[in-house]
Image (cartoon, rainbow, N blue to C red):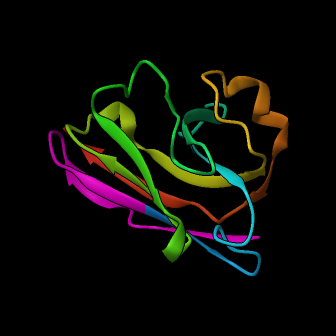
Amino acid sequence: VQLQASGGGLVQAGDSLRLSCAASGRTFSDDAYAVGWFRQAPGKEREFVSAISWSGASTYYISSVKGRFTISRDNAKSTVYLQMNSLKPEDTAVYYCAAAHTYYAGDDYQHLLPDFTSWGQGTQVTVSS
């Protein structure tokens, strides 16, 4: 599966953005893929932000974005979304989406990190104060 992330931009603190991750080739309606969003700020390691199961039945968020970010998916459109509200300057990063070929739908996505092997190019999110 090939992924393409889009929707980034320059916004002010408190604003919202919606990122999209579109699949092509082997699409989300063809097979079971969990999708995760990751981000990497300058000089920092890549951070696992959120994930959603293949059906959308389960989701995961890191504590710093819980209540502000919402992950969702439309398998008919082979697209996963990350709605980001109440953005903060510390959310500034390049955001990447990745897919893991799995039916997993539990609560702990950390153990799936090695399975996120299909990556899209990043989209820059910059939040000014």
In front here: 14 or 97? 97
Q: Residue at x 68, y 74 (%)?
A: 27
Q: Quadrant of the C terminus?
A: top left
Image vertical order of residue 76 relative to residue 122, above or below: below
25 displayed left or right of 16: right
Per the image, is 73 magenta?
A: no
124 displayed left or right of 69: right
Q: To which quarter of the image does residue 109 belong? A: top right
Q: Residue at x 77, y 34 (%)?
A: 113
Q: Residue at x 37, y 28 (%)?
A: 65
Considering the whole magenta stretch, tell me its main secondary structure.
Answer: strand
Per the image, is 13 magenta?
A: yes
Image vertical order of residue 85 relative to residue 121, above or below: above
Span shown in magenta = 1-19
Instruction: Residue at the far bottom: name it.
Output: 25
Provide residue 94's location: percent of width, then percent of height.
52, 51
Provide residue 79's location: percent of width, then percent of height.
51, 67
Provide residue 114's location: percent of width, then percent of height.
85, 36
Q: To which quarter of the image does residue 13 belong? A: top left
Q: Quadrant of the N terminus?
A: bottom right
Image vertical order of residue 46 relative to residue 125, above or below: above
Tag count in the figure? 0
Q: Residue at x 26, y 34 (%)?
A: 88
